Amino acid sequence: MAAVFLFSATAFSQGGAAGLQILEVGYSARDLSLANSNDVITGEPTAIYTNPAGLASIENENGIGLDFMLTHRTYFAGTTIDMFGTRFQGGGFSFGTSLLLSSVPDIEVRTSPSDDPQSSFSAKDFALAVGVAHNFDNVSVGISALYLYEKLFVYESSGYALNFGMQYSPMEDIRIGLSGGNFGSSSAMISEKIALPAFIRIGGSYTKPLDDNFSITGYLEGAAFKSAGISPGIGAELSFQNYIKFRAGYSSGIEIAGYSFGAGVSYSLLKFDYSYIPLKQDFGNSQTFTVSFVF
């Protein structure tokens, strides 16, 4: 059983001993293809987990600010991560909601050395998040609250967390962000209390038009997770008329991943994003598909 617990604890880990590693791994194909270097300044519904101030950002042309996002990610050892997120506006505020679920299937149970396992089970993490943000001219601030649940074999743990953040745009082509989160607590699993992967993020982006059709955006972020040290990331996004985008990134803080690649296509209200991450240590690759409806 010790091996089972070790596997579950490291299945999503970027390092460190904190639990609920689902809160560290990235949530959309765009985030992941940029090596999460845009997390602190993102304006997608995923901001509810990384910097809730981003819920107040309007990245679509018509500016209504109503988003629906569906993401499916495949990871190593059959692990999957799924997210449904929304963002909407009302009364001068921006709101967000999200459901996040991860599953590690077919974990084998052995009580003694043998070729065949006695049984198998799945480990699951679950997060339900709500957030609110407000934009003050070129500064936005936000807060989100998370309910957390983790199950491993017959053992369960639940808890809560809070995220805070701000974003600042001193110029149209520059965005800077600062956030902190996963501050809270979780109940004990067996006899050990689960430590949440609390974080602090700081970073920014700069967009430079190349001509009438092309522009390029650079991203730089440093994220420090509890018990995991600093995880710097850098990314770039080449955009053609804001319809087709090509992305690449690199992070030095992820144990089994470094480089990441991806692309996105936007047409009318629909956006589709894809990311591909080659994994180290013969773990194969991770692929993520995101579909968004932006009004």
Image (cartoon, rainbow, N blue to C red):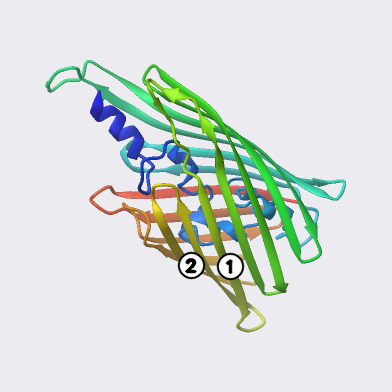
User: In which image quadrant can residue 117 be found?
Assistant: top left
Compared to residue 144, the image places residue 104 above or below, namely above
- How packed mark 2 is, by other alpha carbons closer than 10 Å (few <14, some 14-19, many 20 or more), is many
* Identity of the residue drawn at 62% across and 52% down: 51
At 58% across and 51% down in the image, what residue appears?
180
Mark seen at residue 235: 2
* Marks 2,1: beta carbons within 8 A: no
The percent coordinates of residue 264 (x first, y second) are 55, 60
User: Which mark is on residue 204?
Assistant: 1
Task: Give the left or right position of residue 287, taking residue 204 as reference.
Answer: left
Type of residue at label 2?
Gly
The one of 97 and 24 positioned closer to us in this rendering: 24
Cα separation, mark 2 vs mark 1, equals: 11 Å
Q: Earlier in the sequence, mark 2 or mark 1?
A: 1
Report the residue that reaches farthest toward the right: 91
Q: Residue at x 35, y 39 (%)?
A: 11
